[in-house]
Image (cartoon, rainbow, N blue to C red):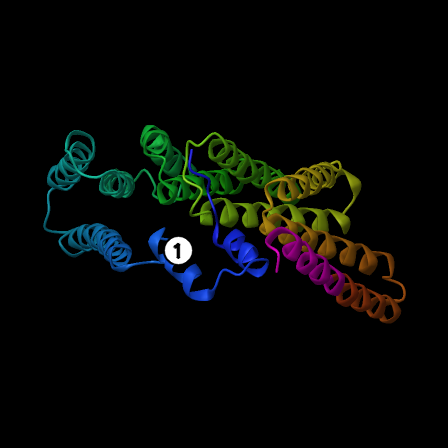
Amino acid sequence: MKPHLSREIIYSIARHSNWGEEGIADWLRKEQVYAGPQDWVKFVRLFLLALGGSFLISGIIFFFAYNWADMHKFVKLGMIELLILAVTFAAVFTKLSGTVKNVLLTASTMLVGVLFAVFGQIYQTGANAYDFFLGWTMCVVLWVVVARFQPLWFIFLVLLNTTFVLYTQQVATHWSFAVVMDILFILNAAAVVIWEVLATKGRVGIQHRWFPRLVGLAAITVITISMVSALFESIDYDYGLAYLLGVAMYGAGIAYGLKVRDIFYLTALPFSGIAVVTAILVRIGENVPEIMLLLATLFVVGSITLLIQYLGKLNRQWHGR
């Protein structure tokens, strides 16, 4: 099996050999590490495809919005249902490329939301209720599982988060803010773990990691907010759940980041810890705010400086530069 040589490994070999810059550039170009004309053509095609799908959905939405009063309710619902069927059948039963089919399934997912919104407006079932987003989410689960398409996963996760937030605002109004943040963390962290497991098994592509990093950043943010908010409330605010989740996140996240050499986890998690420790210092020094504010400022500056130095050293060890 042909070994995989990344650009960093090639540069590391070049620094300890007589391999010249021209030879490196030729090798990288031959192995298609550099983007060539075909790569740019592929990028433009995908970009225009995604742009066309977005314009299609936008045009459908504006068409219904402009002609709303002049259309019969069965025409409104029937046209959207026909569009969903047509787009879905094109994604499933045609011989288009996998990327095109995924884009079509993403368009179908958005059209399902349009259908639910139109139905809610006609029969006054409410388009801002949690069950509206719950029904939308349930109807597209199969497409999300089949597609393995990061933009579609992201839309699905947004629907899940929106459903839960609206549920807490409309039904579970007695839940504390920290508990809501804790559950949001569990939801988004589970999505990141599932993605990483699938990536380890080769079920999803690892070339583009924007989905786990964006969702992971959201999970880290909500649990950090939960820990800080619980710090200024009583212990029964969430019974210490935020701190248990935070400790588990720091330990597992940093260990995984070191194992797979992913600098993202080793950057985002320490910054979260710095924020929490700073909040603890401010909480302790409420009676002497001036002194504690100075100490907190010195802690932030010193800890960030040490973190940057450590990450720079780690990056040189990993990549030889």
Numbered-mark total: 1
The majority secondary structure of the magenta stretch comes to helix
> Is residue 117 among what the camera can see?
no
> Is residue 148 among what the camera can see?
yes
Which of 159 and 313 lies nearest the eye of the viewer?
A: 313
Which of 240 and 287 lies nearest the eye of the viewer?
A: 240
How far across and down, in percent of the image, does residue 21 sit?
Answer: 46, 65
Residue at image coords 19%, 51%: 56
- Within the image, what quadrant is residue 86 found in? top left
- Within the image, what quadrant is residue 48 found in? bottom left
Magenta segment includes 317: yes
What is the span of residues highlighted in magenta in the rendered image?
Answer: 304-321
How far across and down, in percent of the image, does residue 100 sit?
Answer: 22, 42
How far across and down, in percent of the image, does residue 269 sit?
Answer: 66, 50
**Residue assigned mark 1:** 27
Task: Give, as a three-letter code, the residue at label 1.
Answer: Trp
Residue at image coords 50%, 33%: 200
Which of 200 and 29 lies nearest the eye of the viewer?
A: 29
How far across and down, in percent of the image, does residue 18 sit?
Answer: 53, 61
On screen, residue 201 versus residue 133, left or right, reads right
